[in-house]
Amino acid sequence: MFVKPGPRPDDRDRQLVVRGPNGRVLSPIGENVPDTQFWNRRLRDGDVVAAEDASAAPAPDQGAAP
């Protein structure tokens, strides 16, 4: 599952700093994380938000000939 840090409750324009179960900080642009109870709790609590992985999205068609 791909997640990004959620917004801060006191300043919605800034993201939370979220640490994984190993203590490493989640990247502000988002990361693929395992679908575990830990990350599902973070998602439920609003600490992270589900997002689409921009690097996995198909590239736009570059003017293919008909």
Image (tube, rainbow, N blue to C red):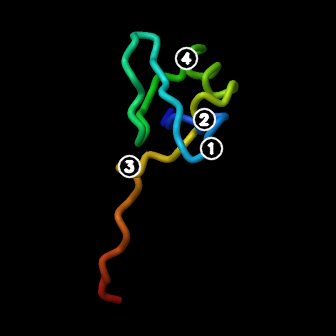
Where residue 10 appears, x then y in whole percent? 65, 35
Is mark 1 in CB contact (under 8 Å) with mark 2? yes
Is mark 1 in CB contact (under 8 Å) with mark 3? no
Mark 2 or mark 4, which is nearer to you? 2
Number of residues whose C-alpha sits closer than 10 Å to that of mark 1, classed few (under 14), some (14–19) or many (20 or more): few
Distance of mark 2 from mark 3, alpha carbons? 27 Å
Q: Secondary structure at mark 2?
A: loop
**Quadrant containing the C terminus in the rendered view:** bottom left
Number of residues whose C-alpha sits closer than 10 Å to that of mark 2, classed few (under 14), some (14–19) or many (20 or more): some
Give the vertical position of 48 relative to 58 (above or below): above
Number of residues whose C-alpha sits closer than 10 Å to that of mark 3, classed few (under 14), some (14–19) or many (20 or more): few
- Please report whichever mark, 2 or 4, sits nearer to the chain's N-terminal start: 2
Q: Secondary structure at mark 4?
A: loop
Is mark 4 in CB contact (under 8 Å) with mark 3? no
The residue identified by callout 4 is: 36
Q: Secondary structure at mark 1?
A: loop
Where residue 1 appears, x then y in whole percent? 51, 32
Q: Residue furthest right?
A: 44
Distance of mark 4 from mark 3, alpha carbons? 21 Å
> Residue 29 is drawn in which quadrant?
top left
The residue identified by callout 2 is: 8
Give the vertical position of 47 relative to 55 (above or below): above
For image coordinates 38% across by 33% down, the residue present is: 27
For image coordinates 43% across by 38% down, the residue present is: 30
Residue placed most toward the observer, 54 or 6 = 6
Q: Is residue 54 left or right of residue 50?
A: left
For image coordinates 69% across by 25% down, the residue present is: 45
Distance of mark 1 from mark 4, alpha carbons? 26 Å
Could you tell me the amino acid type at mark 4? Answer: Thr
Could you tell me the amino acid type at mark 1? Answer: Arg
The residue identified by callout 3 is: 56
